Amino acid sequence: MSLSFLTPVAALATLAGLLPLAVHLRRERRARTVRAALRLPAPVPASDRTLLAALVAIPLLTGLAAAQPVLDRAEARQERTDAEIVFVFDTSRSMYASAGVREPTRFDRARRIANEVRAAVPQVRAGVASLTDRTLPHLFPTVDGFTFRSTLARSIAIERPPPSSYARLATDLNALTAVGRQSYFSPGTAKRVLVVLTDGESEKVRVGLPVALRRAGIRTILVHVWRPREAIFLTARAEREYRPDPSSRETVRQFAAAVAGAAFSEDELSAAVERARTEIGSGPTRPRAQRDLLALMPYATLAAAFPLALVLRRRNL
C-alpha cells in the first residue's frame, strides 16, 4: 500500500491560507493590547485555540485535496493462464424495455447478471463487447474486477453506438461471427467462453456463425433477458411502436443449438453461473498484481468543510 499525489504542485494552495491566519493573529495581538490598557479579562482560552486550529486546518486540508492524493492498495492475486471469458451485451433499443417506468430495464438486468457471473470466476480474465447488427469490443480480457465493473457502468450503453442500419431488426446475433474471426480472446487461450446477454429479438441464425465459433474453440452461453408484457418507457408513457416478441425464446434456443452452446432465461442465473464454471473448469494460474486506487481528494475536501463551518459560525475574522 502506498500514497502518491497526482498534482503535488497544487499543494501550494496551502499558502493562500496564511493570509487569514496572519490577519487573525494580528487582530488577537491588537486585542490583547487593548484589553491590557483597559484592564479587561482575557477571553476563554479554549475558544481561541479552537478557532486558531480551524484556521490552520482549512488551508492544510484544502492543499491536500488540491494535490489529489491517491492510495494504491495493490495486491497480488492469482490469474488463470489458460482461460478467458467475454461478455457480449445486446445494446439495441429493445433492451430499454422494462415492466414499468421505475423498473430495471433489460439492459440493467443484463449488467447485473454479468457482474454475478464474473464474480463467480474471479481468477479468469474477462472482457466486454456490445452487439447490435455488429459486434464491438469495449474491454479486452483482464483479471481486474474494478476495470470490468467500471466498463459496464460507464463505457457501454444502449445504441451507443447505434446499429449501422435500421432497415431490419437492430439486433443480429450473426454479428457474433466477429468474435470467432477477430482477436476478442488472447492468442493461445485454450478455454474460451462467450456469454451473450440478449433479449433474443434478432435476425435468424445463419450458417457462418456456428462455423466461426467452432473454429475458434469458443464455448457459448446465452442468457435470455426478456419477459412478456414489457414496454419501452423513455417517458412516463409506454412507446406504442414496441411490442415484445414471444418468438425470441425460440430464436435463442435455435442459436444455442446451432453453436452447440447452452441457453438460460434470466431467472436461471444460478444454472448459468454453474455452466460458466463448468466450461472454465480448473487450470494453471500465475500471480498478477491488481491495482486498486482510492482517490482521497473527496474525503480531504469534505474534512475541510467542518473547520470552515466553524470559522463562518464565529464570523470574527
Image (spheres, helix red, strand yellow):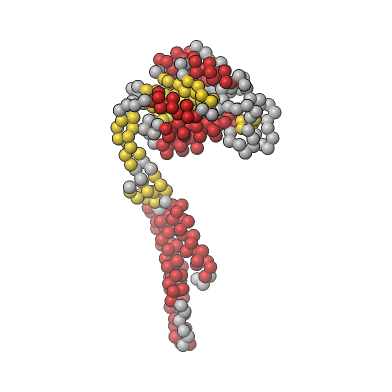
User: Could you tell me residue 122's position as x and y percent?
Assistant: 39, 34
* Quarter residue 123 falls in: top left
Residue placed at 33% from the left, 32% from the top?
Answer: 79
| Residue at the top extreme, as displayed | 207
Using residue 273 as the reference point, say whether residue 96 is left or right of it: right
Q: Is residue 191 above or below residue 26?
A: above
Q: Nearer the viewer, residue 17 or 291?
A: 291
Using residue 116 as the reference point, say whether residue 203 is left or right of it: right
- Residue 16 in sight here: no
User: Could you tell me residue 298's position as x and y percent?
Assistant: 46, 52
Residue placed at 49% from the left, 15% from the top?
Answer: 257
- Residue 27 in sight here: yes
Q: Nearer the viewer, residue 281 or 19?
A: 281
User: Could you tell me residue 251's position as x and y percent?
Assistant: 56, 18
* Quarter residue 82 falls in: top left
Q: Is residue 202 above or below residue 307?
A: above
Residue placed at 44% from the left, 25% from the top?
Answer: 275
Residue placed at 68% from the left, 37% from the top?
Answer: 236
